Image: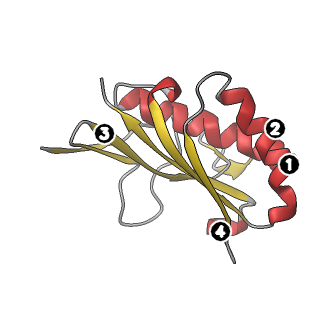
Amino acid sequence: MRQTVATKGAPGAIGPYSQAVVAGGFVFASGQIPIDPKTGEFVEGGVAEQTDQVFRNLTEVLKAAGCGLEDVVKTTVFLADMNDFAAMNEAYGRHFKTEPPARSTVQAARLPRDARVEIDVIAVKR
């Protein structure tokens, strides 16, 4: 069984993909960038503020799928510049205070809309 997830609480897909897909007891959330869904624009500030917005977006997608950040088992962080790692990592840590998920972090040549950070997650659907 496969179910797509969509919510107005996070930016809509800007291409032929779903905000998330539930399958096999997991939620596979597409990468989120730091767009404020109310304005359609990036949040102001640096990579820390952008990371916080990405997590607000991911939280809304996960909520629409029936779970939350506490259910995340794996994340992938894409940075436009690995020099932003420390700021991203500090903001990231605020969202996973205990038992953080597995994570990969990579530098990407370019992210959608020239974002500085994009994060996707896989969560367990309880």
Q: Residue at x 78, y 37 (%)?
A: 91
Q: Which mark is residue 20?
A: none
What's the CA distance linking mark 4 and mark 3?
25 Å
Decide which of tag 2 and tag 4 comes sooner along the chain: 2
- Characterize the local packing of mark 4: few (<14), some (14-19) or many (20 or more) Cα atoms within 10 angstroms: some
Q: Mark 2 and mark 3 in contact? Answer it, CB < 8 Å.
A: no
Q: Mark 1 and mark 2 in contact? Answer it, CB < 8 Å.
A: yes
Decide which of tag 2 and tag 3 comes sooner along the chain: 3
- Determine whether the residue tagged by mark 4 lies in a helix, strand or loop: loop
Decide which of tag 1 and tag 3 comes sooner along the chain: 3
The residue carrying mark 3 is 26
- Determine whether the residue tagged by mark 2 lies in a helix, strand or loop: helix
Residue 69 sits above or below residue 118 on the image: above
- Determine whether the residue tagged by mark 1 lies in a helix, strand or loop: helix
Q: Residue at x 65, y 68 (%)?
A: 111
Q: Amino acid at mark 1?
A: Ala
Q: Amino acid at mark 2?
A: Glu
The residue carrying mark 4 is 111
What's the CA distance linking mark 1 and mark 3?
29 Å
Q: Amino acid at mark 4?
A: Leu
Q: Position of residue 88 (x, y in %)?
A: 78, 47
What's the CA distance linking mark 2 and mark 4?
21 Å
The residue carrying mark 1 is 86
Q: Which mark is residue 90?
A: 2
